[in-house]
Amino acid sequence: MKLHTPITEQNIYDMKAGEIVYLSGTLYTGRDSAHKRMVESLEEGKKLPVDFHGQAIYYTGPTPAKENRPIGSCGPTSSYRMDAYSLPLMKQGLKVMIGKGDRSDEFIKDMIEQKAVYLQAVGGAGALLSRKVIKSEVVAYADLVAEAIYKLEVIDFPAIVTYDIHGGNLIADEIKKYNQIKV
Amino acid sequence: MRNVDVRDLTESIKALALDANCNIGTPFIDVLRKAIKREKSEIGKNVLEQIIENDEIAEKNHEPMCQDTGMVVVFLEIGYDIHFNGDIYDAVNEGVRQAYQEGLFRKSVAKHPITRGNTNDNTPAVIHVKLTPGDRIKIILAPKGGGSENMSLVKMLIPSDGVEGIKKLVLHTIFYAGGKPCPPLIVGIGLGGNLEESALIAKEAIMRELDDVNPDPVLAALEKELLDEINLLGVGPMGFGGSTTALAVKINAFPCHIASLPVAINLQCHASRHKSMVF
């Protein structure tokens, strides 16, 4: 399915685990340090540097761009490291999170309550995924360099719906199909 | 006695780091292609195809295959009969510094584990030096990503845990790591030694060639058995489910204390980057 940001309530409802989404529009990047800083700002009663209402965040820390390219390699990083910071951002209107790997049960519960979705891009495919980015600029926390918040303009960025608001869980469902050994 | 200019060491490190981050090499891509044929999951096949396409783009354009260009690990084997005209640790770090600047690689080293920050040049590298007979230098360099390193561990088992205990630990670790270490994996296992030796030999294990054969028949059999069982876990490429969770298991061993059975598991993601040279 093709989607364009900002993400509507209907879009969230329509996204089902296992479906591939081709996302166009804006993605904000953010990983460990930017998340920590944003959540600390909220705790101090300050505003976030970005208005996340209806927006998507992509957990990545890109390599520096080559000349004449909008961005360097930019694959997803592991999402569980952002679990501790995700609820306050969803409360600020964040609707889509894109990363890699599974996340905590608590995160999934909060995500469903906040009517948001979690997608995965292919980890380690940073060179390939950079071809979906047509523009990038740092919009906050420039001192964090690769960990700064970049505003990316993307066309048909591929990601697979992993946890949806209906309780769908791609990871649990798919692994179950192929698991033949107990741990 | 052979005199070696440390600037030659710097140049070699730089060349290896520039190459390793961008060029995974044809043998590895061939292994991925074979895995596609065996993979049972359609999503899994698609992920493997994307990984190959990614690695080919990186090689063709000489750009990093993954944005996590790692913390650099360097194994140096240095002949006894060599004299250097300067500090080898400084020389290695200078090579890393130059490669990460010129190659436009990400600077992924935090200055301090608690106060964080960034060293801004991807140094220091983690450097392991071994002395060997002769007057040659062997370098193995690996940009090691954080995702797979974070899912690695050392566990001090006891002798009665035995092979069953080792297998249980490996399977449990890989299953619960899921997609986080970026499977399909190379699984490096260090058995024996003590706490730090087990970790070191596990790291050395992931530097081994994919198709090498373990000279120890007990370990060779265990490598095969574990690979088969890991691929029955169902984790699959990037943890999206499937039958390709690992491409290889490599076990290195060392004698250990009569009370201990140390087991280190060092996971290597599918961006399995290491390059070596002898000079």
Image (tube, coloured by chain):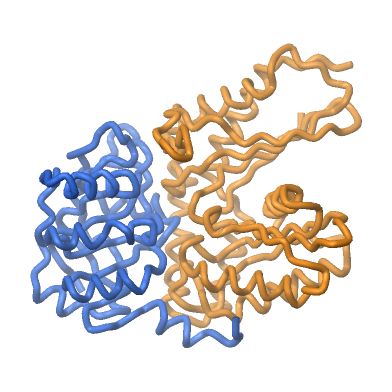
Residue sitting at the far top: B85
Of the pair B55 and A182, the residue shown nearer to us: A182
> Residue A69's x, y, as percent?
29, 39
Residue A35, how many percent across, how many down? 28, 49
Total of numbered circles in the picture? 0
Instruction: Name the side, left or right, on which B160 lies relative to B202.
Output: right
| Residue B124 visible from this viewpoint | yes
- Residue shown at 65% from the left, 69% from the top: B170
Chain A color in figure: blue
Q: Is residue A71 left or right of residue B57?
A: left
Up-down relation of residue A130 to residue B184 (above or below)? above
Q: Quadrant of residue B132?
A: top right
For this rendering, which residue is in front, B159 or A56? B159
Q: Position of residue A1 (x, y in %)?
A: 20, 74
Q: Which chain is orange?
A: B
Do we see residue B105 in this rendering? no
Quadrant location, the C terminus of chain B: top right
Q: Could you tell me which quadrant the N terminus of chain B lies in? A: top right
Looking at the image, which is closer to me, A107 or B242? A107
- Give the vertical position of A48 relative to B259 (above or below): above
| Residue beneath the point at 15% across and 79% down | A13
Residue located 26% across and 60% down the image:
A86
Residue at the image point whose x is 35% and y is 74% from the top? A105
Q: In the rendering, at what x and y percent does residue B172 appear?
A: 60, 73
Q: Is residue A73 left or right of residue B217?
A: left
